[in-house]
Amino acid sequence: MIGKGSALLNLGILVSGRGSNMDAIVANCANGSLSAQVAVVISDNPDALALTKAREAGIPAFCLKNPRDEGEVIALLDKHGVELVCLAGYMRLIKQDLLQAYPMRIINIHPSLLPAFPGLNVQARAIEAGVKFSGATVHFVDAGMDTGPIICQAVVPVLDEDTCDSLSARILEQEHVIYSQAIEKIAQKRLRVVGRRVISL
Ligand code: GRF
């Protein structure tokens, strides 16, 4: 069972870019639809818009001095009492140190219906491949790239006239919904992981 059962689940959000998923999580914490609070935001990119937005929202936000060193990330997460790590557009593979420090306590949002289209440029690859549906996936993070057990997914159509931008926007809208839904299930301890399957209780 996942989730420690305190009143609010303490989140640590790792970002590299604009942070729209972070924004949605922060908003849902603020409006009470998430039983969670954002304790810290960490970026590997000093220019990430997400860092500015987190600071404006009064959230402790840090840029890593040495992005390859997971020890620095772990120390910041521990210091802020983080119970669940949410990757939100974080452009680095998570390595063993962090995985071991937060076993089954790191989740990610990905803009495709995994296991289809892991990795980068996935909306363009979905259009090129001619799929009629794509979507978004929230999954636990393991040592692979976008390979961990799937918590929830949202499906969106791929339209004949879609460009990478239009498909990305349609998927992103769903990302903002399902990421918070997945976090809330963890906060409410309503998930159990059995092998690769994540069962809703
Ligand atoms: C999202 O599409 C997410 O699925 C992917 O990176 C993008 C981050 O966007 N992992 P944002 O920074 O949350 O706006």
Image: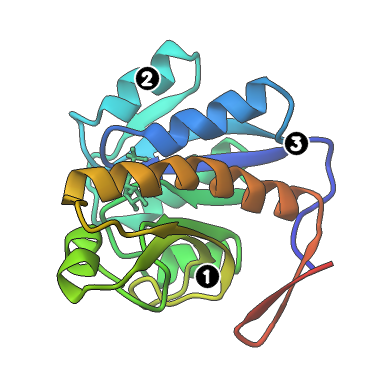
The alpha-carbon separation of the residues under discs 2 and 1 comes to: 30 Å
Reading the chain from its start, which is encountered first: label 1 or label 3? Answer: 3
Instruction: Give above or below for 50 relative to 44.
Output: above
Q: Measuring 37% from the left and 64% from the top, which residue is drawn there?
A: 134
Farthest bottom residue in view: 195
Residues 175 and 1: in front is 175
Asked if the residue under mark 1 is in contact with the one under mark 2, i.e. CB atoms within 8 Å, the reply is no
| Callout 1 amino acid | Gln
Instruction: Give above or below for 153 relative to 166.
Output: below
Q: Circle 3 — which element? A: loop
Q: Residues within 10 Å of mark 1 (few under 14, many from 20)?
A: few
Checking the image for residue 53, the label placed there is 2
Asked if the residue under mark 2 is in contact with the one under mark 3, i.e. CB atoms within 8 Å, the reply is no
| Callout 3 amino acid | Ser
Kindly tell me whether residue 182 is visible in this rendering: yes
Q: In the image, residue 80 lies at what x, y percent?
A: 58, 35
Q: What residue is disc 1 on?
A: 100
Q: What residue is disc 3 on?
A: 35
Instruction: Give above or below for 117 relative to 105.
Output: below
Q: Residues within 10 Å of mark 2 (few under 14, many from 20)?
A: some
- Residue 18 left/right relative to 107: left
Q: In the image, residue 2 lies at what x, y percent?
A: 74, 62
Residues 36 and 150: in front is 150
Residues 23 and 155: in front is 155
| Callout 2 amino acid | Lys
- Residue 192 left/right relative to 74: right
Q: Measuring 45% from the left and 34% from the top, which residue is drawn there?
A: 22
Report the colour scheme: rainbow
Farthest front residue in view: 160
The quarter of the rendered structure image containing the C terminus is bottom right
